[in-house]
Image (spheres, grey):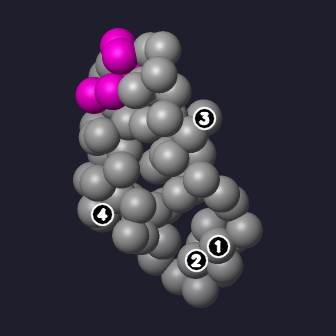
Amino acid sequence: MHHSMILSKEDAPHDEYEAREMEKRPYHELIGALIWISLISRPDISFVASYLSQYSTNPGCTHWYAVQ
């Protein structure tokens, strides 16, 4: 995640097309993998993993690009 990136709940999908596109993407699985990696070997990414997990109920494309 880039240090100047600011995320908010406003980045959630705005229409049905965006919502369907985000359902295809494994956002929850990737967040879980980041949290697992932060616990096992990379404690430096735990803040980012926790920050991105706040948007796991309704992630948008901006959140997806931040996770990647």
The CA span between labels 3 and 1 is 16 Å
Q: Mark 4 points at which residue?
A: 10
Residues in magenta, as a range:
43-47
Q: Name the residue under label 1.
A: 23
What amino acid type is highlighted by mark number 1? Glu
**Residue 19, which numbered label?**
2
Q: Residue at x 40, y 26 (%)?
A: 39
What amino acid type is highlighted by mark number 3? Gln
- Mark 1 near mark 2, Cβ–Cβ under 8 Å? yes
13 up-or-down from 65: above or below: below
Marked residue nearer the N-terminal end (1 or 4): 4
Q: Can residue 2 be seen in this view?
A: no
Q: Name the residue under label 3.
A: 68
29 up-or-down from 23: above or below: above
Task: Sort mark 4 into few (<14), some (14-19) or many (20+) by Cα contacts within 10 Å.
Answer: few
Q: Is residue 33 visible?
A: yes
